[in-house]
Image (tube, rainbow, N blue to C red):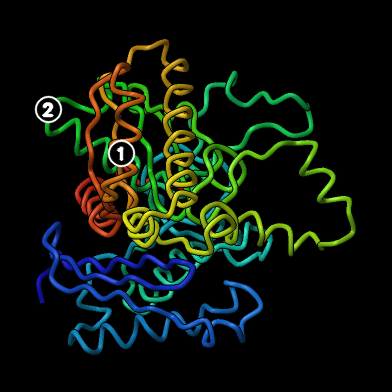
């Protein structure tokens, strides 16, 4: 087998994406959807480790690829402690945190654990890169209106940094020389100010910013307090309502923007109002990030699945094009971004960071 084979693992809430690369050339890819009934027997994402690892083993066997044929394994990084962007070796301390059960319960914690398990058998390096906890905030961005509740950086950093590098390269520049506002628009939204290679501000995709297909975004504080203190809902129920059943799901009963667009075309005025309100809030957050960089913005980048939507994108553009040109890079290519990080790590060990 080729010595540059890299296995990439990207666990999501309801799926596991697995890919085999020869350096940056994709060879094999599978997107395994896990049924709710399969996942219901696990009380946490951490408990799914053996189940998800078995799926990776099946994929390798189907591809006639042994772990020892690989040069490296890289997984999606989870909600770890605040870190700068880049590629990290999955060592003892990182493994300890991933296994602790004390992190935010998100499927991405399994990326590093599975990568390490595959790599250990073959005695090859395991990495993660640009985890959701990438924190490159300026100190001024951390201050909230209450000292015990500082603003925290949790975002779709992997895709944001990958698309920043791509757009900069398209213009013949380096990301370290450019100022971008990036709107990652998926099930959750991350609107980031990316200045000279650093993500200096971003809304916490779980807590604040625009509402999204599945998340509530910033809510009226007094109303939220009344709801929390009403005794009608437990903490877990409220969390699920706001992160998973909020946004479009709460208003329209679906998280699928394509379905909402069809309803609008069929004359559904409520669907139009809600979807346009979502675009309005995205645009407003983009405007806020422009002030972070004092208006010095080279381009606004729209990425993620919602950037495919033929209604949402024009609604955003008409409100923000006065700030900077809008570049649309729909979808995401996190698998390729992870493979690129692994390639850099293999080519130059000095870029690999320790946790």
Q: Quadrant of the N terminus?
A: bottom left
Question: Relative to 210, is 63 above or below?
Answer: below
Q: Nearer the viewer, residue 245 or 141?
A: 245
Q: Position of residue 69 (x, y in %)?
A: 20, 77
Q: Which mark is residue 35?
A: none
> Is 324 on the left-hand or right-hand side of 107?
left
Q: Residue at x 74, y 24 (%)?
A: 145
Tell me: residue 237, above or below residue 170: below
Q: Earlier in the sequence, mark 1 or mark 2?
A: 2
* Residue in view at x 41 percent, y 86 percent: 54
How far across and how far down the image is residue 196, in percent?
Answer: 33, 22
Where is residue 98 drawn, in percent x and y? 57, 62
Tell me the number on the disc at residue 171.
2
Give the CA distance from mark 1 to mark 2: 16 Å
Q: Which mark is residue 302?
A: 1
Picture residue at 45% right of the left edge, 49% below the top: 269
Q: Badge 1 local density, few (<14 within 10 Å), some, or many (20+)? A: many
Say what secondary structure mark 1 lies in.
Answer: strand
Count of numbered circles in the view: 2
The image quarter in which residue 42 lies:
bottom right
Crowd around label 2: few <14 · some 14–19 · many ≥20 (10 Å): few
Q: Residue at x 49, y 46 (%)?
A: 274
Q: Is residue 275 left or right of residue 334?
A: right
């Amino acid at each position: 087998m080729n010595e540059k084979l890299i296995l990439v693992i990207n666990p999501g809430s309801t799926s596991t994406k697995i890919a085999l690369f020869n350096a940056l050339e994709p060879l094999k890819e599978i997107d395994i959807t896990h049924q709710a009934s399969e996942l219901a027997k696990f009380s946490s994402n951490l408990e799914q480790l053996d189940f998800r690892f078995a799926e990776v083993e099946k994929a390798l066997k189907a591809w006639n690829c042994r772990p020892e044929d690989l040069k490296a394994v890289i997984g999606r990084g989870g909600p770890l402690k605040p870190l700068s962007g880049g590629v990290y070796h999955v060592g003892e301390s990182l493994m300890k945190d991933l296994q602790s059960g004390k992190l935010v319960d998100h499927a991405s914690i399994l990326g590093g654990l599975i990568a390490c398990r595959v790599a250990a058998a073959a005695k090859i390096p395991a990495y993660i890169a640009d985890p959701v906890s990438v924190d490159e905030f300026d100190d001024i961005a951390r201050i909230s209106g209450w000292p015990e509740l500082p603003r925290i950086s949790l975002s779709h950093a992997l895709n944001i940094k990958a698309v920043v590098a791509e757009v900069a390269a398209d213009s013949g520049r380096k990301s370290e020389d450019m100022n971008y506002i990036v709107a990652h628009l998926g099930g959750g939204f991350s609107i980031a100010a990316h200045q000279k290679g650093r993500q200096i501000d971003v809304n916490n995709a779980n807590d604040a910013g625009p509402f999204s297909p599945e998340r509530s975004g910033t809510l009226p504080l007094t109303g939220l307090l009344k709801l929390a203190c009403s005794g009608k809902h437990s903490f877990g129920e409220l969390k699920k309502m706001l992160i998973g059943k909020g946004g479009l799901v709460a208003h329209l009963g679906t998280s699928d923007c394509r379905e909402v667009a069809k309803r609008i075309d069929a004359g559904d005025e409520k669907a139009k109002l809600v979807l346009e309100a979502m675009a309005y809030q995205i645009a407003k957050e983009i405007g806020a990030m422009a002030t972070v960089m004092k208006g010095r913005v080279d381009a606004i980048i729209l990425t993620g699945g919602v950037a495919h939507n033929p209604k949402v994108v024009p609604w955003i553009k008409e409100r923000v094009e006065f700030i900077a040109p809008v570049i649309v890079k729909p979808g995401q290519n996190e698998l390729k971004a992870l493979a690129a990080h692994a390639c850099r790590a293999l080519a130059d060990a000095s870029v690999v960071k320790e946790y």
